[in-house]
Each structure stands twice: as C-alpha cells, then as structure tokens.
Image (tube, helix red, strand yellow):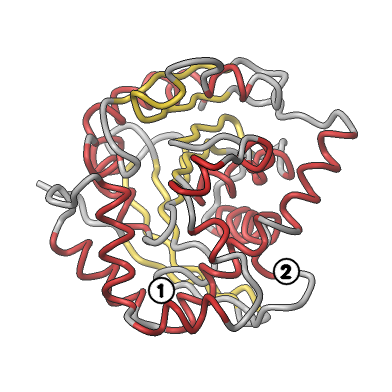
Amino acid sequence: MNLAFEAQRHALGDGVAIQSYCAGQGPAVVMLHGYPQNHRACLPVAQLLAAHFSLVLLDLRGYGDSTGPAPDAQLQPYSKRAVAGDVARVMQALGHERYAVVGHDRGGRVAHRLALDFPDRVQALASITVIPTEEMWDRSSFGFGMQAWHWFMLAQAAPLPEVLLAGDPAFFLEHTLHKMAQGRDFLKAQSLTDYHRCFARPEVRLAMIEDYRAAAGIDRTHDQVDRAAGRRLAQPVHVLWERGRYASGETPVDIWRRWTSGEVTGAPVAAGHLMMEEKPDEVAQQLLPFLQLHTA
C-alpha cells in the first residue's frame, strides 16, 4: 500500500512558490528530482524509505507545480545557489534544522550546492547519477556531446530552445524519457501523465531551459570560485551511477573525493539514468544504511 504524501505550498516571494510533499517519520531527508520530471520521480524510492525517515519531496523552482521568477541576463534566478536557497527555506519552514539530501540528475546538482552553502544544516549528501557540474564540463567530449546534446542545446540563448521545445512538447518529452530510461515501460502511468501535464506549460519548459543555461554559466563560476579557494564539502557523500558507465578510469567515487573532505562511498546500479523509477528497491537498499548512519 502506497503512503500518501501531504502537499503544502510555500510562497517565498519574488514569484517563487515551492510545492512540497511530506510523509514518514524519523530523521529528516529531502529528496530532489531531475530533468524533465518533478517530485514523482522520487516517489518509488520514497515509499520504501518512509518507515525510517521524515521525507520531504520538492518540485524544484519552476518545475512541476512550483513556480519561479522571470529570468535575468546573469542567469542568477535559476542558478543552483538560488534553487538550493529555496530548499533550505522550505526545510526550515517545515521545522527541519538538520537533514540529509538525496538528489538525482539536476536535483543532484542542487543538492551539491545546498551542502556547500548550508554546511550547518546538511548532514549527508546522496548523489544519484551525478558528478559535480564543473567535472562534467571538464570531461566533455564528442561522445558526451552526442549522448548529452541537450546540455548544449538548452543552454543556447533565447529564443532558440524555447521555440524548438514549443514545436512539439509531447514528442520532445517522450524522446527524452525514452532515451534516459532505455525504454519507459517501468514509468508509472500516473507519473508519465503528470510529467506531460507539467511539460506542456511554457513556464515549466522555460525553467528547465534556464536551469541548463545556468549550468553553462553562473553555476560554473560558482564551482570554479569554490575550487580555487579550496572550498570542499565536509559531509559524507554516497554516489550511485549506471553500471557500465565509468568502466575504465575513474569512478564517481574517485571524482567526488576531489570535492569533499568527508568520506565518499558508492556503487553502480544495473539500471538506466532513471534508476529511482526503474530499480527503486536497489536504490533504497543503497540509500538506507548510508542515511541511517549519517542522520540523527
């Protein structure tokens, strides 16, 4: 039987309103979804963790049923720093002063910035399929560009991505999810319907585009400043990645060790990019001992 998550809306000002979904009991854990989805991407794993933790699922700024401000030329409104600030404010409003964060895809990048900017609040970071943004750009190659072409297309100046996505939003979303999921048979019908409902809205697509523009601009600047200053995560990190990736050379564990002074653990999962929905049992089994060890 699936546990019901209670929805709550948090008006943060300047056009930002964040939708949260809460359930469970125990130490606090916030879960952050990725592109092109919303909080429903976290639900299969959250259902398995709710007996152990007070879970908070969010629609990121501008995604799902959350709203965001108008973009600016500096890309600040959709920077990971701004979005991480939303998460911190919502968690405080919900009464959670200390918590762990689990982030998948874009949510993993927000989780990284949240842990850096709020070290007194974030106890531990679980990063699903994500290495630090600046590492992704450093490792970009022909193969990366062919596989992750949307990183480059969505980062283009307006109005190119906006016009392209508006041409056939349903096709674009289906193509994206099919590629990420290596087929989408495991995606729950209710989740898929909700992804389409949200992606059909121009303001949601704009938030996603601005997210990628920020990743190619201001987010890189923030990461580069931190790296030059020797500023690193202090929290323990647990990272999961798709089995078969990083088969030669460094693993995500090796990579994250350059960005943290804390312990880094992790493992591959026999799944595609959307592993929280494809293999929720395996992901939950990986997360549970890590979160139990590092939350109180």
Q: Which residue is mark 1?
A: 65
Instruction: Examine the image and state in which quarter residue 52 appears.
Output: top left
Q: Nearer the viewer, residue 161 or 114?
A: 161
Q: Which residue is mark 2?
A: 75
Residue plotted at (74% across, 78% down): 72
Above/below status of 204 relative to 25: below
**Residue 267, quarter of picture:** top left
Callout 1, which amino acid? Asp
- Which mark is on residue 283? none
Residue at horizontal 21 percent and vertical 64 percent from the top: 192
Label 1 neighbourhood size at 10 Å, few (<14), some (14-19), many (20+)?
many
Furthest residue in direction front, as rendered: 142
In the rendered image, residue 183, in percent from the top left (x then y), is placed at 19, 49
Q: Residue 196's spot in the image, x, y percent? A: 27, 73
20 left or right of 50 in image: right
Viewer-nearest residue: 244 or 43: 244
How far is mark 2 from mark 1, CA to CA?
21 Å
Give the image location of residue 160, x and y in percent: 56, 79
Q: Is residue 46 left or right of residue 69?
A: left
Q: How many marks on residues?
A: 2
Label 2 residue SS: loop
Give x and y (percent) for residue 36.
40, 61
- Left/right placement of residue 55 relative to residue 278 reads right
| Residue type pointed to by label 2 | Leu
In this view, 126 is above or below 203: above
Q: Residue at x 51, y 51 (%)?
A: 106
**Front disc: 2 or 1:** 2
Q: Secondary structure at mark 1?
A: loop
